[in-house]
Image (tube, grey):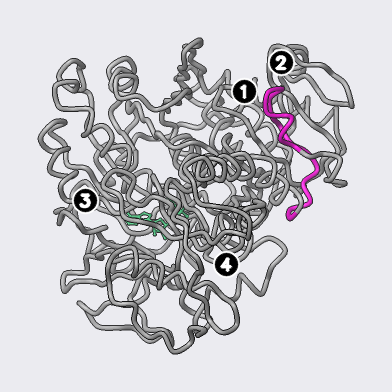
Amino acid sequence: MNVEALPARQGTHQLHNYEEIAANFDWTEVEKEFSWYESGKVNMAHEAIDRHADSYRKNKVALYYKDQNRHEAYTFYEMKRMTNRAANLLQSTSNLEKGDRIFIFMPRSPELYFMMFGALKMGLIVGPLFEAFMEGAIYDRLDDSEAKSIITTPELLERIPYDRLPNLETIYLVGDEVKEQDGHIDVLKHLPDSSDNFELEWLDKEDGLVLHYTSGSTGKPKGVLHAQYAMVQQYQTGKWVLDFNETDIYWCTADPGWVTGTAYGVFSPWLNGVTTVILGGRFSPDGWYKAIEDFGVTVWYSAPTAFRMLMGAGDALVKEYDLSTLRHVLSVGEPLNPEVVRWGAQVFDKRIHDTWWMTETGAQTICNYPAMDIKPGSMGKPVPGIKVAIVDDQGNELPPNQMGNLAIEKGWPAMMRQIWNNPAKYDSYFLKDKWYVSGDSAYMDEEGYFWFQGRVDDVIMTSGERVGPFEVESKLLEHPAVAEAGVIGKPDPVRGEIIKAFVALNDGYEPSEELVQDIQQFVKKGLAAHAAPREIEFKDKLPKTRSGKIMRRVLKAWELDLPTGDLSTMED
Ligand code: WT7
């Protein structure tokens, strides 16, 4: 293996001349920075870990990990060894082959990343699952993707209905007390004596990388597949947007169960050879500020709900910690209120930079760059080399200041490549075979800044997590008391939106506080805690179309005291 000297690009990538670069940017320029541009052979694990381990970055810390019990650091060299061991363990204990789906369902820990990149070294497609998912949510995802394997913990094992998942062959368990029954494999027992050497699987740039399930307004969650090639955009936005420099200590607060936690938790920083911090455990204002102080975080990527919760914890708390290392602060996931930007400027002495993207885009798409003026409330401007526009429902571009569908021209590097098992659904995202329609409404001002207006569909963003109303409604209907259910997002000052359910009861059931709690528990246990309605309102009957579809728009109008609009399709 060649020892690569990767020149630091300190200060050279700040987009001071955004307009000039954006006018004629060609992604081949970025492709040329990777050896696969010549060889045609690619693997994310090589680009993110191994090539740094074989360079001057060998002894540089790749991963700092901290939770209540552990405080550890791993260099790129150590990450290479540990991921090789993980790959050897997977290979010697399974029939897994290139392109097979393996899921990871466990709380954050160094082992999660060893196993994830071990799986990538084998050429597997990794499906990350948020640890709060319950049996129903796990079943849907593993069943749809015909997953062959899952990596989890002994505590979470009971949520995996493996007797109902005929394709699921091997279960890997990460934990201190593992019983190797039913063919389950004890990861911590076998990792230490697995070999440090592994010949990784060379792939094509269009081969699969990660499969993230995400919610729409109808149907079950959909499997969004990204290709290895997504790395081009994840790498370059690390420079342009996250402003990575060689000496940065970067912390992205997202869980790897969501796309931010993979693309920007590990891929983007490691593609750039940057040290990344992973904090385990739950959110706490003290713990978070302490993490910034302890690690000397320089670049911090989080979400509006988290910033609003920190804001709620008070400014006095901020002063108890030394946050002076922070150079660059960013946000994603929901609208970033100007009020929060102003608060950030006041307490951190840093502007919070908003970024817009989504699971389907695979990487940051509209951003506020360090060298560009921020208009608080705006998502910023498109990443150079990506064309974003506001289009009408027919796919015609609209002029500045007109509200419409936020759309992206097909073919950006990190674009999803498939909706798993559902080509018709994939095609339905595109208008005129040219525009990917995001489901968000927005407008662009005369200076080319984009302004978010809302979702066009009924998708709910609660605490930055995307929840499909249909999934929640379906789960509610499984409760014996529930006859009809309609679910909406209700605006909330901290969480952006909360989930509110309108419920009509079956005969023999009466509204009560116990019933509310019982129904909430039912959704929590069946789906996930973050998908349970915080509010439930009982109604005798819900507004429906003549074909029987619940009219969420009417529920929303009731809730917000707005006019209900056209009711011509409503049943009598
Ligand atoms: C939806 C995508 C990959 C990021 C995490 C969420 C909303 C995202 C912003 C922003 C306003 C935003 C949109 C989008 N969203 N960023 N900066 N301002 N809204 O990914 O779960 O796929 O959700 O999140 O509505 O469509 P996701």
Residue 188 tag number: 2
Q: Which residue is mark 3?
A: 337
For marks 3 and 1, the one nearer the N-term is: 1
Would residue 500 be found to the left or right of residue 297 on screen? right
Quarter of the image with the N terminus in it: top right
Depth check: 374 or 497 in front?
A: 497
Residue at position x 41%, y 49% from top? 462
First reached walking from the N terminus: tag 4 or tag 2: 2
The residue depicted at 13 percent of the width and 38 percent of the height is 345
Question: Element under label 3?
Answer: loop
Residue 219 drawn at (x, y percent): 62, 65
Considering depth in this image, is 572 or 103 the residue closer to the camera? 572
Q: Identify the mark nearer the N-term, 1 or 2.
A: 1
What's the residue at 74%, 37% (across, down)?
160
Q: Which comes before the other along the chain, label 3 or label 2? A: 2
Q: Nearer the viewer, mark 3 or mark 2?
A: 3
- Kindly identify the amino acid type of the residue bearing the numbered disc 1: Glu
**Residue 291: x %, y % from top left:** 34, 20
Q: How dense is the environment of label 1, judged by Cα within 10 Å: few (below 14), some, or many (20 and up)?
A: some
Q: What separation in Å lies between label 1 and label 4 (alpha carbons)?
A: 35 Å
Question: Would you say residue 224 sits in the magenta stretch?
Answer: no
Residue farthest to the left?
A: 346
Q: Which residue is mark 1?
A: 111
- The disc label shown at residue 322, or none: none
Q: Residue at x 74, y 55 (%)?
A: 144
Magenta residue span: 144-160
What type is the residue that disc 3 sits on? Asn
Q: Residue 443, image x and y in percent?
A: 26, 72
Q: Which residue is mark 4?
A: 218
User: Disc 1 beta carbon < 8 A from ligand 1?
Assistant: no
At numbered mark 4, what does the secondary structure look like: helix, strand or loop? loop
Q: Nearer the viewer, mark 3 or mark 4?
A: 4
